[in-house]
Image (cartoon, helix red, strand yellow):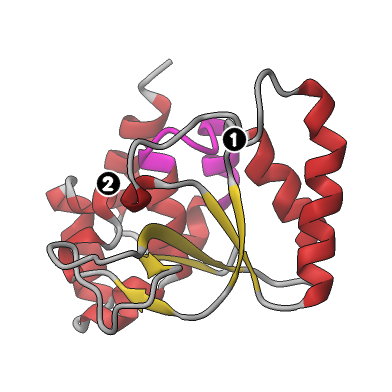
């Protein structure tokens, strides 16, 4: 995973916002390096961490996978077919063509990381502008770790790559590894 950003997709209203969402869905954009992980592997990770039989109560929170081309659509259909026998109930996750993505408001980006004021200050030091922070691979990784994804062993293996101060490293390790 190179970066993640939150925003809105799948609708027709121009320039959606959180308070004027129209027919869009809140979504996560994932950029990845296909030389490191394939699209099919990304889909496998998605299905392992998502319940496709869960029915959303509104379009805003609808589960969807957006495809950019026919090859991606076929990969999604194939992956869904392979997991369908293990799913209880009908599949509710929508498969939709990508028609655009609108970045969500600043306060939605890296939401979990923003809740750690000390670590957020570390990133504000590294990225004085919001765009660098939002596009940062390190910020995306830390946001995931702080949300409970990845685990202590994996964090310890890559913590040197994040550019944190010794105090920032200590706080991150305590937040992630201290949960045991």
Q: How crowded is mark 2: few (under 14 residues within 10 Å), some or many (20 or more)?
A: some
Q: Is residue 121 visible?
A: yes
x, y percent for residue 70:
80, 75
* 23 and 175: which is toward the camera: 23
| Residue on which disc 2 sits | 112
At mark 2, the secondary structure is helix
Q: Residue at x 79, y 22 (%)?
A: 86
Q: Which residue is drawn at 59% across and 35% down?
A: 49
- Using the image, determine if residue 2 lies above or below residue 47: below
- Using the image, determine if residue 74 lies above or below residue 15: above
- Dot 1 and dot 2 residues touching (CB under 8 Å): no
Q: Residue at x 27, y 40 (%)?
A: 171
At mark 1, the secondary structure is loop
> To which quarter of the image does residue 145 belong?
top left
x, y percent for residue 96:
60, 64
Total labels: the figure holds 2
Q: Is residue 36 visible?
A: no
Q: Earlier in the sequence, mark 1 or mark 2?
A: 1
* 7 and 97: which is toward the camera: 97
Q: Quadrant of the N terminus?
A: bottom right
User: Range of the magenta residues?
Assistant: 145-158
In screen coordinates, is 87 left or right of 22? right
| Residue on which disc 1 sits | 49
Chief secondary structure of the magenta portion: helix
* 139 and 95: which is toward the camera: 95
In screen coordinates, is 14 left or right of 71? left
Q: Quadrant of the C terminus?
A: top left
């Amino acid at each position: 995973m190179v970066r993640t950003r939150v925003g809105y997709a799948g609708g027709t209203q121009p320039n959606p916002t959180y308070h004027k969402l129209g027919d869009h869905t809140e979504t996560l954009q994932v950029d990845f390096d296909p030389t490191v992980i394939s699209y099919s592997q990304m889909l496998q990770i998605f299905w392992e961490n998502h319940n496709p039989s869960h029915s959303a109560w509104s379009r805003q929170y609808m589960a969807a996978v957006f495809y950019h081309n026919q090859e991606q659509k076929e990969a999604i259909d194939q992956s869904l077919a392979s997991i369908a026998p293990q799913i209880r109930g009908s599949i509710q996750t929508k498969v939709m063509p990508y028609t655009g993505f609108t970045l969500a408001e600043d306060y939605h980006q890296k939401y979990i990381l923003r809740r750690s004021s000390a670590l957020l200050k570390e990133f504000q030091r590294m990225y004085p502008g919001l765009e660098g922070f939002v596009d940062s691979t390190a910020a995306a990784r830390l946001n995931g770790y702080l949300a409970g994804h990845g685990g202590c062993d994996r964090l310890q293996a890559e913590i040197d790559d994040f550019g944190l101060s010794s105090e920032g490293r200590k706080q991150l390790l305590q937040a992630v590894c201290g949960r045991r």
